[in-house]
Amino acid sequence: MYFASDNAGPAHPKVIEAMTRANEGFAMPYGNDEIMEGVRARLREIFEAPEAAVYLVATGTAANSLALATLSEPWQTAYCSPVAHVYEDECNAPEFYMGAGKLTPVGNSDKIAPSDLAAVMGDSADIAVHSAQPGPLTITQATEKGRIYSCEEIAALTEVAARAGQPTHLDGARFANALVALGCTPAEMTWRAGVDAVSFGGTKNGCVGVEAVIFFNPEKAWEFELRRKRGAHLFSKHRYLSAQMQAYLQDDLWLDLARRSNANMGVLSRGMKEIGAVFEHEPQANILFAALPRATHRRLQEAGARYCLHGSTEGDDDEMLSARFVCDWSLPESEISRFLDLARG
Amino acid sequence: MYFASDNAGPAHPKVIEAMTRANEGFAMPYGNDEIMEGVRARLREIFEAPEAAVYLVATGTAANSLALATLSEPWQTAYCSPVAHVYEDECNAPEFYMGAGKLTPVGNSDKIAPSDLAAVMGDSADIAVHSAQPGPLTITQATEKGRIYSCEEIAALTEVAARAGQPTHLDGARFANALVALGCTPAEMTWRAGVDAVSFGGTKNGCVGVEAVIFFNPEKAWEFELRRKRGAHLFSKHRYLSAQMQAYLQDDLWLDLARRSNANMGVLSRGMKEIGAVFEHEPQANILFAALPRATHRRLQEAGARYCLHGSTEGDDDEMLSARFVCDWSLPESEISRFLDLARG
Amino acid sequence: MYFASDNAGPAHPKVIEAMTRANEGFAMPYGNDEIMEGVRARLREIFEAPEAAVYLVATGTAANSLALATLSEPWQTAYCSPVAHVYEDECNAPEFYMGAGKLTPVGNSDKIAPSDLAAVMGDSADIAVHSAQPGPLTITQATEKGRIYSCEEIAALTEVAARAGQPTHLDGARFANALVALGCTPAEMTWRAGVDAVSFGGTKNGCVGVEAVIFFNPEKAWEFELRRKRGAHLFSKHRYLSAQMQAYLQDDLWLDLARRSNANMGVLSRGMKEIGAVFEHEPQANILFAALPRATHRRLQEAGARYCLHGSTEGDDDEMLSARFVCDWSLPESEISRFLDLARG
Amino acid sequence: MYFASDNAGPAHPKVIEAMTRANEGFAMPYGNDEIMEGVRARLREIFEAPEAAVYLVATGTAANSLALATLSEPWQTAYCSPVAHVYEDECNAPEFYMGAGKLTPVGNSDKIAPSDLAAVMGDSADIAVHSAQPGPLTITQATEKGRIYSCEEIAALTEVAARAGQPTHLDGARFANALVALGCTPAEMTWRAGVDAVSFGGTKNGCVGVEAVIFFNPEKAWEFELRRKRGAHLFSKHRYLSAQMQAYLQDDLWLDLARRSNANMGVLSRGMKEIGAVFEHEPQANILFAALPRATHRRLQEAGARYCLHGSTEGDDDEMLSARFVCDWSLPESEISRFLDLARG
């Protein structure tokens, strides 16, 4: 009954098999392996972006930090949600990679409103030398709260950024979960909606540790390569990153796995609703924030359920305590059932 | 006939098997997996250092840069050989992680002489606010030229650093190759000789991508963890790093593989000597810098041999051209024989 | 009729005279001049802090950025008001000097509430490696809105910071204005209320360009010196900074000038109130945010009055537009009268 | 008898007078003062560079660091002499401002040889992602050893840099001393010889603390302004920097003062030679490195002479000890005579 995160489950067996298959003889290092050629071609095809620059790194924080750094200058501020992973969970990695750039939280929600963004990005003609200069927008899809921007919502945000002369980055640690929920194409969810760069997540969706960074305009490709090396994120034995991504993309494994984790959340959230859990938002991907009585939490945790509980299991039984539940693709439905049975009491 | 580097060979099958074995169910993320507990204990045992702080990262550049940063301040300079990997091959990653610290090249060789070091580290009592302040010493064992410091040579260098109040870092990307050549213990080659922190390499010696960073004094352990996260080098699915290192240490696989690559170099260098190659140094580990006539290089390269040639195959046939040859553990002896046959002409 | 800022007025003649007097023969460079000895002693006396480390720099941004950097680590976040100068008006200088550290805006006002601070600084025992670590608190006294923290309010804030193990910095660009308004001693407004470091402003209060940075605990004095040099803020001909500060402190000139600018604001604000201006806050130092009808603004600006108007003079005459008015010590009362006459219409 | 540096002498009275004159009423802050307009125009005229971007900062380290940062990227290395001020005397300020860029020492002398430079800047087509990328060249004129590059020598160096696609910065802390020694025009010594940016020193040649940074190609002007603000080097009361530079340029004061300090060195060095001092180089500007017997040094130092002596006055009387002697413009000839009399014994 592990609902703490989708970063604790196993890799899909096909991913491990691809790594094993890749483990044969010598291969050119540093991204020059043959598997990477195929990965690059396949991602360009999937995104309908034949010119895109495509790179692999091993962590989501690296993907986000390197992408934001490449899109910004050290005297700028990037705009993000106050609950964005880049703002809350990367221990100043974005600032470090941006060369001491800034992140400005916009609004009070996981989804940024275009009007809130417009209010802070302002009119770049007005900006004096004294304040942080406007920099890129970064949005998370699916968000850290398990919600999803529609393609139109993304387009409305990128338009605000573009009016200020700024690009948009999309943190797609759960890109696939959002895509299958929306039922649109990768191109529609990104460059057709004005997105300039994507962190395309694999790790949380069945890989060992691999994320692609994709720039639809390849102008800064070489700069990215230098930034990646300088950040110590260029793998010598790169083929093992390539192999993961190869298997992940093959036969739409990435979409299958995202459908599974979203479906798992469907089962969980329907059950939770029945037992009276209070939702922060209706879950659209594989994350749910919901409140349950303390007594229920205590029973669940004592039975071994793992999830992020905000508060202590000691105290008034009836008090509602909020918690985060994440469904991994690998979660057996029996575990969800057992969890719900326990929650029902 | 691949002699270009030991970063292009496969991982040892046992390493892949361990990763496959680790791919079962949920595991605590971020270094809290159970396998890591065993790895930590085993490395402390191997190094006879029960208090040591032990961490894993995926690249050697990350290990070196994070270790140096943890041992220094941004207004300091670290001391290294002018051919050190940190100085020549990490695209300013050490400087980046050190917060814009400096690296001062010492002497003209891969091995630093204590007298040269003493001349530049000087008397710290003398240092005014104007110059970069003395920082840590970093040495590479085995060196980038394939040579090895004796334990006494290491002790002589760390003593100079310690007199200036500074710690010593050892870049052990080829730690095992040096250790089996010296026939000493890990403790003798490190903390007993005054070394404070080690990058303990796995990647070049049969792993997929894993390096341990070991601090014998755990005082800055938490700082290192923060630096690792901020550098985007903390893996969520950390168990796959742990599993590599577990297999690498099990039954002395790491020592076996190093013996193999050193033995491969023995075969190669004896053969090269017979055919009149001119050595820069007698190889002590698995790297050789040697000059051959251009015609020989041309013949080798045309037959598909891969290694770093300094110069063009076009030109005077008899001119001696220097090249770097590295032997991977996985290199079949038949390949070395074929190479030598070709070289003989 | 210059109300745009207190950074555009002249230096007090005594400050220039002191610089002229200092311009005699050779003087030890880099802060080793004799005048500095006297300045250091005098500031320690004024602050009743015989152990304090005292340094001079030429800009307020340098004072704040260097002080915050000295009190923090690159993986931390400093806490400040969202309208703090460090947050809004220093073009990422604090982040740059902090080594890519972060600034977290607290609350929605120029004055931070202890409860808001406690909510974000949280319980440091809880902090995992993923988020920015708690760092120092920085408050501005007088604030950017012209308000003043009482000594008790300062103590309440520093207590919250101290509970999280963090020091407090006070941005005293307008230190003197606050001090004379409160009628307390420098010690009461700083270390007795738990403040650890102060940017003690001179530039906005009658100097050419000089700020003192004072650490009540001198533990990091040498680190500060290295940071100052590395930031290129160590003056070789330091005596001209020393001479300014000498004159500024002599015979309480600094207090006299602050009383003058505060008194000027008294005249201005009383007059503004009479003519119906709507105040954002009651001014406590030399800054006022007040709204006037657009037509009034147009009349004032056309007559040559200079101040920061938020909005355009084009549009509906009756609409109230907010503006910032700052009174310099050097502002002749006749100018204020002329301004008020014009405002009255 | 102060020969320790030209940063310890007084400002020329006209510089102080100009500051006093500027101290009248309100003036636009942050470089928008009227005096600066004249300074900008005058420097463009002097350099015959009507498009040049011209800025003022208060320290030479700021001028150099900001200029190098503007001309480089964080993954590059700048090339300099191993005795360059930027390399030896700025406590990692260039690296800090360059965003953790690197400085590569070229050759073994204060003057860089074009062949040495070509050897290290290499062929940029060859550079892989692993090493620091080629960045700007920086030369010092007059050098830290008191020597001067001819305009042809400068052109030969900038040509090597340009072939690698890199700009050249000239550290002109003693620009005027070199110029009057060469008898050429500022344009000839800079952009006509291929120099892209200049730190034009005032502080060491009679100012209080002011340096101009000049970019002949104004393309990065706005970036420089942001970097200056972010470095905390933008003065609010900028007029006092402007006034210094105004007086410095007026009626060729800058050239007169440089002639005086060079002439002082002429007197000193002729005298030194007569008494058998051994010169490291023939002095061409206002700096001399010369060796004298220890007994002579002891006599001089005991009589109050101030200069940088490399070694202790304790020891064998006859041993020759090297020392650095710098002549300020303000040095009275009587002091030089007294010094030489003492040296004669």
Image (cartoon, coloured by chain):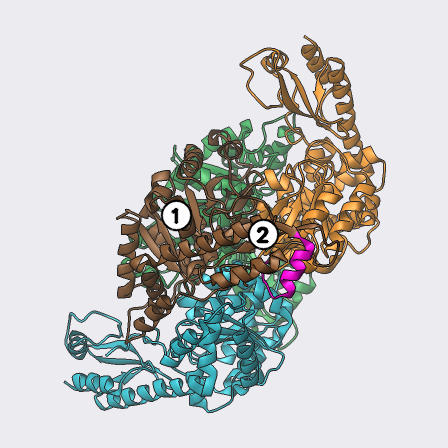
Chain colours: A brown, B cyan, C orange, D green
**Magenta region includes residue D158:** no
Expressed as whole percent of the image width and height from the top left, the position of residue A175 reads 41, 50
Expressed as whole percent of the image width and height from the top left, the position of residue C273 reads 75, 17
Q: How many marks?
A: 2
Label 2: state its secondary structure. loop
Q: Are marks 2 and 1 on the same chain?
A: no
- Answer with left or right where residue C254 lies relative to residue B316: right
Residue C101 numbered mark, or none: 2
- Foreground residue among C14 and D95: D95
Expressed as whole percent of the image width and height from the top left, the position of residue A137 reads 46, 41
- The chain identifier of the residue carrying mark 1 reads A
What kind of residue is marked 2?
Answer: Gly
Please, is residue D245 above or below residue D106 in the view?
above
What kind of residue is marked 1?
Answer: Leu
- Foreground residue among A188 and B315: A188
User: Residue visible at 66% across and 61% down?
Assistant: A299
- Quadrant position of the N terminus of chain B in the picture: bottom left
Residue A179 numbered mark, or none: 1
Q: CA distance from mark 2 to mark 1?
A: 34 Å
- Answer with left or right where residue C184 lies relative to residue B87: right
> Dot 2, how many residues are within 10 Å of its Cα: few (below 14), some (14-19), or many (20+)?
many
When asked about the image quadrant of residue A228, the answer is bottom left
- Foreground residue among A210 and C343: A210
When asked about the image quadrant of residue A59, the answer is bottom left
Asked whether residue D124 is in view, the answer is: no
- Answer with left or right where residue A140 lies relative to residue A88: left
Asked whether residue B126 is in view, the answer is: yes
Residue D127 numbered mark, or none: none
Single out the mark in the foreground, 2 or 1: 1
Label 1: state its secondary structure. helix
**What span is colored magenta in the figure?**
A293-307
